[in-house]
Amino acid sequence: MAKRSNEELEQVYAARTPEELNAAYAGWAAGYDRDTLAAGYCLPFQVLAWVARYVKPDAGPLLDAGCGSGLSGPYLKALGYGRIEGLDFSEEMLRLAGSRGAYTGLKRATLGEGLPWDDNYFAAFLSTGVFTEGHAPAASLRELCRITRPGGMAIFTVRDTIFHSGGFSATIADLAGRGLWRRLEQSPPFRAFALDEPDVLVSAHVFEVLA
């Protein structure tokens, strides 16, 4: 990446509290899309392959969990998904997401805390680039499952460096052991940035929510 985005990405990864992370994104919001896309950030678009594979456009409302600036929204809409809602903890990022005209609803919320939707509300959720260094905890998956209906899809990426140390492997196994979901697919690690940051690897995970 360019020097400026390197510094801002490092601030994001270095954040240790929600307040620090919110401040890092607030300072980066205006240049976020330009900087990340220049580096070849592909996750907001790559995830659409799994959404299209597992979720019918008329299945019901879809949640973009940790939607950021809303890069996925217009492309989901172009694929025929008409009911797309988003959540993010950053007001600045939500404003950018809202300007894209693709989301039917946007709410400020923090992954890892209670979410402002009823049980079994969504037909699916997607979350990319969110489960990474210094970001949302593995426990977020339990609450995301709560608001996803039985038979719905959970589609998300996890950074390789925190899959075990961040508790994701244990949380995934716990949810499966309690009969809350079943695995449909797990990708091998792949690059989150097509051009820069070759060491930033993620894997994609797809589960069917059961209860």
Image: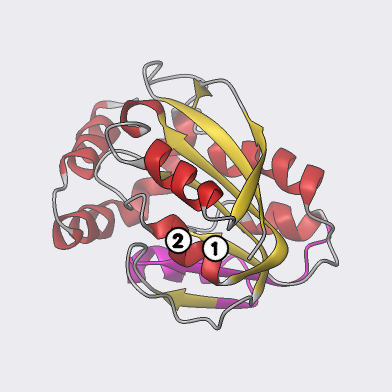
- Kindly indicate whether the residue at mark 2 contacts the one at mark 1 (C-beta within 8 angstroms): yes
Q: Position of residue 45 (x, y in %)?
A: 63, 41
Residue at left offset 49%, top offset 58%: 67
Q: Nearer the viewer, residue 164 or 9?
A: 164
Q: Amino acid at mark 2?
A: Arg
- Residue 134 disc label: none
Numbered disc 2: secondary structure: helix
Q: Could you say which quadrant of the image residue 179 lies in?
A: bottom right
Give the quadrant of the C terminus. Answer: bottom right
- Residue 43, above or below 31: above
Q: Could you say which quadrant of the image residue 2 lies in?
A: top left
Few, some or many residues within 10 Å of mark 2 (<14, 14–19, 20+): some
Q: In the image, is 85 to the left or to the right of 58?
A: left
Q: What segment carries the magenta color?
A: 80-105
Numbered disc 1: secondary structure: helix
What residue does disc 2 label? Answer: 142
State how the image is colored.
secondary structure
What residue does disc 1 label? Answer: 145
